Image (cartoon, helix red, strand yellow):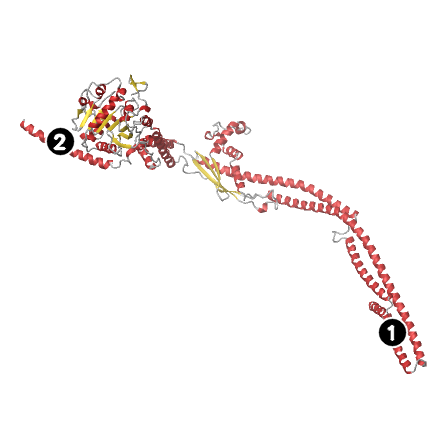
Amino acid sequence: MDFGPLVRANSQNIREIQPTRGADLGPAAGPILYSQPDPQESALGEYVRVLIKRKWIVLGCLATIFSIVTIASLRMTKVYEASGTIHISKPDATLNFQNSATFNLDYYDPSELDTEVKILQSDLLALQVIRELNLDRRPDMGGTTAPPSSLDLAPDPLQADPALASAVLGGFKSNLKVTLSPNTRIIEVHYRNADAQTAANVVNTLMQTYVENNFKARFESTMQASDWLQKQLVDMQMKVETSQEKLVRYQKEHEILGIDEKQNITTEKLDELNKELTVAESERMDKEAFYRLVESGDPDAISSAAGVDSSGSGGPSGSQLLETLRAKQADLKIQAADMNTQFGPSYPKLAQLNNQLKEVDSQIQSEMKKIASKVRGQYMTALQRENMLRDALERQKQEANKLNESAIEYNILKRDSDTYRALYEGLLQKLKEAGVSAGLRANNFQVVDSARSPTYPIEPNIPRNLGFGAVLGLATGVLIAFLLEGLDNTIRTTEQAQLISGLAPLGMIPLGSKSASEGTHPKRLVIASSKEAVELITQVRPQSQMAESYRALRTSLLLSNLGAPPKVIMVTSALPQEGKSTTSINCAVVLAQKGVRVLLIDADLRRPSIHKTLGMGPRSGLSNVLTGSTKLEQAITRSTILPNLHILPAGTLPPNPAELLASANMRDVLNQLREQFDHIVVDTPPSLSVTDAVVLSPRADAVVLVIRSGQTTKQSLRRARNILAQVNAKVIGVLLNAVDLSSPDYYYYYEYQGKYARYYRDGETSEDEEEGEETREEASPSSSSA
C-alpha cells in the first residue's frame, strides 16, 4: 500500500493515507446527502421553543426593567398641565375697507391659522409673558434666584444677559404646546409646570397678551393707513384740480362747446347739412326730369308737367288754361270739319271757325312756352340749391375733421380728469372708514376657555410608564433570548444536524449523567432520571426510553442499504467525549439481541475504553492481531452479557495506530470477520482529532457519525462530514447523543415523552418492586435458618 506523508498526532509519527488513493480500502461510496428541510417550516414553533428555552432570561429582563421603571416613575417630579382655547373668527366686514385686497383679513386659508399658531409660539410673546410673571427668576425655568432690584431704572436682565434669555426661552418653549384643533378655528394652548397655579397663569397671560397685541397691531395699522391716506388725498386733490384746468383750457382753445361728442354743435350741423343735401338732390332730379319732358315739345308731357307743378303750388296754374284751350281747339276742329262736310270750304262761318282755331293755336303755343320757361327756372333753382348745400357740407366736414383731431387730446385730458376724480373720491371714503375703524375696539380674537389650575398631574403617568416598562422589559428579554440563540453555535436538534451536514438523522439518544455513588462499578454512566447505567442500558433496562432509542438506531442501520443490511458498521464522532463508545456498545447489544452473531471491535488504539466498560482486564486484542503477535481467534472474547455477542478489544497500545488501521492486515482481518459474523461494530477515535477513523472509514459498509447535543459545534460537524466525504466513506447519517428531552428544543418534537415515559417508568417501578419482594422472600428463609 502506498502511504502519504508523515503527520504528527499524539506525539507519534504516523502516515496518513491519501484520500484519492482509497480504491483498495473498501467500497468507494460517499456519504448519503439529503435535501435540507424548509427553514420556514414551523417557524412559529421555533420562536416559541426559543422563548421557552430562554424563559429565565426573558423574565429576568422583564423584572429588572420593570423595577427600574417603577422606581424612576415614583421618584419623578409631578408635572401639571393647564390648557386654554382661543377662537379666531372672521373679521367684521363693516370694519374692513371695501374692495381692498390690502386690508382684507379673511381666514379661509388654513395657512393663516397656522401663522397665528406660530405667533403664539414666538419668542416676542414668550418674553412678554416671562417678564410679566417674573419667570426669569425661577430656577426651574433656567433663570436665577437673585432678588429683583428696587430701582425701576435697573436694566432688564434678559436684555443684559443673552445666555440667560436663551436658557429661559428654552425652558419656557419646551413646556409650551400650541395646536390647531382640526376643522375648527379654535387654537389650544397647553403649558406644563411643576406648580399647577403657575401653569394656569402662564396660559392665561399668554392668551391675554396675544389678544392685546393683536388689537394693538390692528389699531396701529389702521392709524398708519389713515395717515398715509391723508397724505395721498392732498396729492390727489392737486392732481384733480390740475387736470380739470387743462381740460377746460383746451376746450376753450379748440371751441369744443358740447359736453361730449354726441352733443357737439359741429357734429349736429354736419348731420343736418347731410340730410338737407340728400333732399336737395332728390328735388333736383325731379325738376330735371320735368325739364327734359318739357323740352321734348310733347303737349301731353307739358300738360302733365304743368299739372304736377300746379299740384305743388296749390292754386290755378297754366295747366288748367292749357287744358281749356286744347278742349276749345278740339271743339273748333270738330265744328270746322262738320261745316266743311256740309257746306264746303267756302262757307263763311267755316272761315270764321278757322280764324278762331288759329287764335286758339297761338294761345296754346304761348301757354306752352310759359310752362316750359317756368319748369326750366325751377330746375335751375333746384340745381343751384344742391350745389350750395354740397359746398356747405364739404366745409362742415373740414371743421368736423379738425374737431376730431382736437377730440383725441380732449378725451385724454377728460379721462385723466375722471380717473383722478374717482381716485380722490375712493381715498376720501377710505379715509373716513379708517377713522371709524380706529375708534372702535372690535377684535376677531376671543378667549373661549381660560386656564384653570389642574388638580391631577399629567406626569408621571404611572399606568403608562408601568406598561411601557413591561413592554420594554419583555422586548429586551426576547431580543436577548434570540441574540443568545443566534450566538449559540452548537447543534441541539436533528433538524439542525440535517440542515448543517445534509445527512439523514439516524435517531436521538436521551441524556445520561455520571453517578457518584457507583465508584468503579462497570455501570458508570447513568440516566439522569433513574440513576441507571447507560453503557449497558439496552441490556439492563430494555424497556427504558434510552434502550428504545438504540433499537430505533438499529432499525435505521438495518434499513440503510437497499440490498442486505450493512455488516461492518463504524462508529465515530467529530470530537472526543461525544458518546461514540457508549453508542458502539449499545448498538452491538441491540444487534445481538436480534439473535445474530455480532462482533464489537475497539479500534480506538490510542485511548481504548470498551474493555474497561465491560469489566475486562488488559489483554491482547486488535493491535496484537495486526502486528501478528496474536491470532485472531485468541483475541476474540465471548461477552458474558449475551452469548452471541463477541468482543475484540484494542489490545496493547501501538506506536503507529493509523498505519495499522490502514494496513493490508486490517483489510484481511475485516474480510475474515465478515465470514464469521453477521454484524461487526467498530468503535474508532474522533475523526477531527486523529486520522484513524478517516483511514478506516472506506472499509466500512456504513459509518455512523455521533454528535453530542449542546456540545458539538456546527463547524465541527461540517468539517467531519467533509473529511469523511473526501475519502468516499459511506456515512449513512448522524446520531444525536445526550439529548435533554426536558429542554424546550424537544418540547414540540417529543410530546409523547410525558405520557409514554411515565408508562415506562411505571413499568420499571413495578419490576423493581417485584424484584425487591423476591429478594425479601429469599432473605427471609436464610434469616430463619440462621
Q: Nearer the viewer, residue 474 or 125?
A: 474
Report whether residue 530 is seen.
Answer: no
| Left or right for 143, reference 352 | left
Secondary structure found at label 2: helix
Q: Does 574 sit left or right of 434 as displayed?
A: left
Q: Position of residue 189 (x, y in %)?
A: 48, 39
Q: Amino acid at mark 1?
A: Arg
Residue visible at 28% across and 34% down in the picture: 746
The dot on residue 772 is: 2
Pick whichever of labels 2 and 1 is earlier in the sequence.
Answer: 1
Q: Residue at the spot x=34%, y=37% of the render?
A: 41
Number of other residues with Cα within 10 Å of mark 2, as a class: few under 14, some 14 to 19, many 20 or more: few
Indicate the quadrant containing the C terminus: top left, top right, bottom left or bottom right. Answer: top left
Residue 140 to residue 17: above or below: below
Residue contact at pointers 2 and 1, CB within 8 angstroms: no
Q: Position of residue 752 (x, y in %)?
A: 25, 37
In percent of width and height, residue 491 lies at 31, 29
Residue designated by label 1:
326
Q: Position of residue 733 (x, y in %)?
A: 29, 31
Residue positioned most to the left: 785
| Residue 372 in the image: above or below residue 66 | below
Secondary structure under badge 1?
helix
Confirm whether residue 97 shows in the render: yes
Q: Nearer the viewer, residue 300 or 652?
A: 652
Q: How far separated are the C-alphas under marks 2 and 1?
A: 190 Å
Mark 1 closeness class: few <14, some 14–19, many ≥20 residues within 10 Å? some
